[in-house]
Image (cartoon, grey):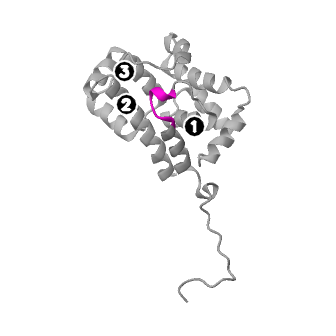
Amino acid sequence: MEGNESVWSELASRALRVLLARKEASYADLAAQLGRLGVEETARGVEGKTQRGTYRFLYFLQSLEALHADYPAHWESAMRSSESWEQKASAILEQEIASRPWLTRREVSRRLQTIGEEMTPRNLSAHIRSGGYPATLFIQCAVVCSFDAGMELFMDRSDLRAAARDAMPKIQRGRRKVVNKLEPHGEG
């Protein structure tokens, strides 16, 4: 769903733009600091990823680290680990879901469907394990699983709710118009 994806990529774009603004950093600054972490990136590449909002969550984590930015306190053990960035991204999403013991992969998948995202529990698990999942998936999970603590560092809760509402299939928003075939239509 391209229109649906744009709702989420806009939020991902905004999260990275907010980070750059908070740290008073330019695209070139972020590219240089990412280079310090061993992540080869150009200013133009940073700009493209930022504007499109189509980057992986691990890139967002790398950007947080590169700019010495604050992040939710409960991410600290993953962020400070010597693991790969994929493993850090995996650990953070795994931790967010695991802290809500009522959330099975099946339940998270079902909730993602309520906002128009089709993902089987098996695919969700594969994305989490790989750590290479898109930032948009993390944001979607944050909405449907209520990852409240710390998300306000990157985006307003009202924006998360609005994105979910806009992404919901129209039938779920109550916009489905039922036409009574027995009544005349039009101006007559």
> Height in image: 35 above or below 165?
above
In primary-sequence order, the first of circles 3 and 1 is 3
On the image, which quarter does residue 137 sit in?
Answer: top right
> Height in image: 95 above or below 133?
above
The amino acid type of the residue labelled 3 equals Val
Q: Position of residue 185 (x, y in %)?
A: 59, 83
Residues under numbered marks 1 and 2 in contact, where contact means CB atoms less than 8 Å apart: no
Numbered range of the magenta stretch: 151-157
Q: In 3D space, how far apart are the residues under numbered discs 1 and 2 (Cα atoms)?
A: 19 Å
Q: In 3D space, how far apart are the residues under numbered discs 3 and 1 (Cα atoms)?
A: 29 Å
Question: What residue is rendered at 62% in x and 21% in y?
Answer: 95
Residue 119 visible to an observer of this rendering: no
Q: Can you name the residue that lies furthest to the bottom here?
A: 188
Q: Please name which of the two marks, 2 or 3, marks the residue nearer to the observer.
A: 2
Going by the image, does 40 lie left or right of 87? Answer: left
Question: What residue is rendered at 47% in x and 46% in y?
Answer: 7
**Label 1, residues with CA under 10 Å away: few <14, some 14-19, many ≥20:** many
Disc ID at residue 18? 2
